[in-house]
């Protein structure tokens, strides 16, 4: 059963699922398309037969993985928000499942690849919960299976970092003005970006959860990062 906090966080998307993709493009000046593309190509490098796209939302990354997979990887999306999933299902024939990242409804050693794009902040309810969710990802991966995490990060250069955080705050303030009833969702976005781990800390957490040899690639001066690690 998902916890109350999981439901509150995934519930934020009930108010914004109509314009979720457009908001992402607006927030990142379209860079999100390039970032997803890069992450999907890294994820598909080892020709996975079966992939789980966790916290798949409206399916942007799930659909891209399917489009870019040469050997037709079977891809399943999972998310806790039924409105986001309903929208995903309207866009493609891929399979989508309602569920929590903390209790993935699949047997152990099942997937060749698990991906999360821009959702780790959502399951970082606290450090312990996040590590438990990462262990759950590891459980459903086959030995040697790959986990790819695409998420906002923190530029290493202190000046660029300050600009990045100021930009995030300002743009989210503007979004709140246009859509005040979703203020809590935008506040969550802003706060979770600022408080999420930097790329090195995230690598340490992946090791703590039992993953092997985490590597990361910065995107746009460290505004985002792709982590790749194996079971
Ligand atoms: C920012 S969206 C990312 C969606 C998609 N991965 C993308 O790249 O566009 C975060 C998603 O995580 C989902 N989510 C939040 N908490 C979750 C949880 N505990 N289990 C499963 N999904 C969750 C939300 O419902 C939402 O669809």
Image (spheres, grey):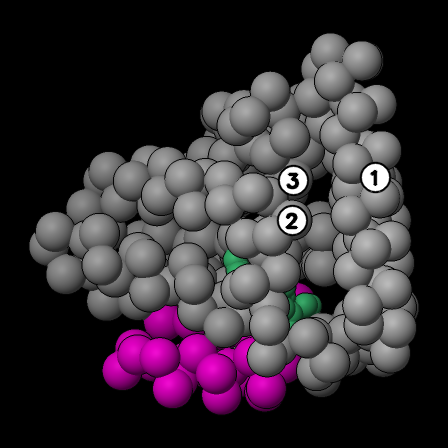
What range is drawn magenta here?
76-104
Where is mark 2, residue-wise? 27
Where is mark 1, residue-wise? 194
Q: Which circle, 1 or 2, is nearer the viewer?
A: 2
Where is mark 3, residue-wise? 152
Please identify the quarter of the rendering in which residue 204 is found: top right
Dot 2: element? helix
Is 168 situated left or right of 141 in this image? right
Is 62 situated left or right of 4 in this image? left
For residue 216, the mark is none
Sequence-wise, the earlier of marks 1 and 3 is: 3
Sequence-wise, the earlier of marks 2 and 3 is: 2
Are there few (<14), some (14-19), or many (20+) residues within 10 Å of tag 2?
some
The image shows residue 91, relative to residue 152, as above or below, that is below
Q: How far apart are marks 1 and 2 (CA)?
A: 15 Å
Where is residue 39 shown, x and y percent of the image? 40, 40
Where is residue 35 shown, x and y percent of the image? 45, 39
Where is residue 12 shown, x and y percent of the image? 77, 74
Is 157 situated left or right of 117 in this image? right
Where is residue 132 shown, x and y percent of the image? 70, 56
| Residue depicted at 71% across the width and 59% down the height | 123
Image region (quadrant) for ligand 1: bottom right
Is disc 1 in contact with disc 3, using a CB cutoff of under 8 Å? no
Q: How far apart are marks 2 and 3 (CA)?
A: 12 Å
Q: In which quarter of the image is the N terminus?
A: bottom right
Q: In which quarter of the image is the C terminus?
A: top left
Magenta residue check for 42: no
| Residue depicted at 14% across the width and 61% down the height | 72
Please identify the quarter of the rendering in which residue 57 is found: bottom right
Magenta residue check for 77: yes
């Amino acid at each position: 059963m998902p916890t109350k906090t999981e439901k509150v966080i995934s519930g934020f998307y009930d108010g914004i699922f109509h314009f979720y993709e457009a908001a992402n493009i607006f927030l990142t000046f379209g860079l999100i398309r390039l970032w997803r593309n890069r992450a999907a190509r890294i994820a598909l490098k080892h020709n996975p037969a079966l992939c789980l796209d966790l916290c798949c939302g409206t399916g942007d990354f799930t659909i891209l993985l399917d489009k870019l997979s040469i050997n037709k990887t079977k891809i399943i999306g999972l998310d806790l928000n039924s409105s986001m999933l309903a929208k995903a299902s309207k866009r493609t024939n891929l399979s989508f499942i309602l569920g929590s990242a903390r209790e993935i409804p699949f047997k152990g050693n099942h997937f060749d690849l698990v991906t999360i794009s821009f959702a780790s902040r959502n399951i970082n309810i606290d450090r312990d919960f996040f590590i438990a969710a990462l262990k759950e990802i590891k459980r459903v991966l086959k030995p040697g299976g790959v986990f790819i995490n695409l998420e906002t990060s923190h530029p290493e250069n202190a000046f660029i970092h300050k600009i990045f955080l100021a930009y995030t705050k300002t743009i989210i303030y503007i979004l709140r003005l246009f859509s005040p009833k979703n203020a809590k969702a935008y506040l969550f976005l802003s706060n979770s970006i600022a408080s999420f781990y930097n790329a090195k800390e995230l690598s340490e957490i992946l090791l703590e959860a039992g993953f092997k040899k985490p590597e990361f690639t910065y995107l746009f001066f460290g505004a985002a990062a792709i982590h790749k690690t194996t079971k």
